[in-house]
Image (tube, rainbow, N blue to C red):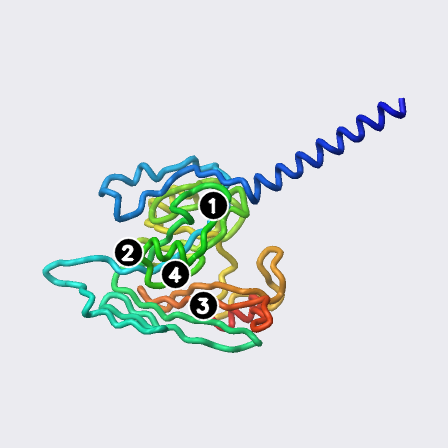
Amino acid sequence: MRKKGWIWTTLFTAALVGFTAYVAADTFLITRVYTTVVPESSQSADSSEIQQNDATANTTVYTTMYTAAQETETAETTTTEAEVISTERTYSDGEISIVITKYREHDTTTYVADVTISDASYLKTALAQDAYGKNVTEKTSEIAERAGAIFAINGDYYGVQESGYVIRNGVIYRATSADREDLVIGADGSFSVISESETTAEALLEGGAQQVLSFGPALVTGGEIAITQDEEVGKAMTSNPRTAIGIVDSLHYVFAVSNGRTSESDGLTLYQLAELM
């Protein structure tokens, strides 16, 4: 009886270890593509339906937010290469203006981009490998190059959660709600912070949402810091590399990206990032 009991215990332990390993691999390693996103340049005016996807899908996909010039030629506006002024930390083409400033505070290097655009359509998001799925990853620089971005930052890593609204460029990819705040970017380029428990993804889309990013907490509202020194994001450590986006005025934005957890840069606390913003 003891021998049989030992065998069953061994089998149970092996099965448990195997199941745990599978869950870990399924969560972090196994890639599944649910929807391939057709690049904007390849879409016709009525092709958005092919981007729709099962709203309950679990994902771990990177999103990159970027600003890109558009090829436009009308009677009123013509954008040509001759009008583009570009340096290591500035860009201007008559439609988009970007100035990047480097700061050194709290033993941390932070880059802040002041971005002004003439139309909200210049502010977009892109998915890693142009795919909505699970464990689909790609470097921000690679996504930006493929998208033709002038300036790009990490958007979010929303697949850490199995729920939460995902709207990208006016398309709903996931509509299951979660108990969190989101950043909503409207079709007019406006910003708002919403609680998913108080609205639906469909209502946000009907209200003009173009991008809904896994967010929170809001750092600054009405020109005042909106968090305390004790607040943090999830299980994040005190000092971290950070990314933040803010709106100054209509179509005028500020992006901040700080280095962290390196010998050259400690990283910022959430409150220090709020002070910077």
Amino acid beneath label 3 = Ala
Counting residues from the start of the chain, the first of labels 1 and 4 encountered is 1
| Left or right for 146, reference 12 | left
Amino acid beneath label 1 = Val
Residue under circle 3? 256
When the figure is inspected, residue 30 is found, relative to residue 262, above or below; the finding is above
Quadrant occupied by the N terminus: top right
* Element on which disc 2 rests: helix
Please name the residue shown 57% across and 76% down the image. 107
Please name the residue shown 52% across and 45% down the image. 178
Foreground tag (3 vs 1): 1
Q: Residue furthest right?
A: 2
Amino acid beneath label 4 = Ala
* Element on which disc 1 rests: loop
* Element on which disc 4 rests: strand
Counting residues from the start of the chain, the first of labels 3 and 1 encountered is 1
Residue under circle 1? 136
Amino acid beneath label 2 = Ser
Residue under circle 2? 121
- How many angstroms separate mark 1 from mark 4 (CA)? 18 Å
Counting residues from the start of the chain, the first of labels 2 and 4 encountered is 2
Q: Residues within 10 Å of mark 3 (few under 14, many from 20)?
A: many
When the figure is inspected, residue 262 is found, relative to residue 175, above or below; the finding is below
Could you say where residue 168 lies in the image, as x and y percent from the top left?
A: 38, 48
Pick whichever, 77 or 5, lies toward us.
Answer: 5
- The quarter holding residue 230 reads bottom right
- How many angstroms separate mark 3 from mark 2 (CA)? 21 Å
Counting residues from the start of the chain, the first of labels 4 and 3 encountered is 4
Decide if residue 3 is in sight here.
Answer: yes
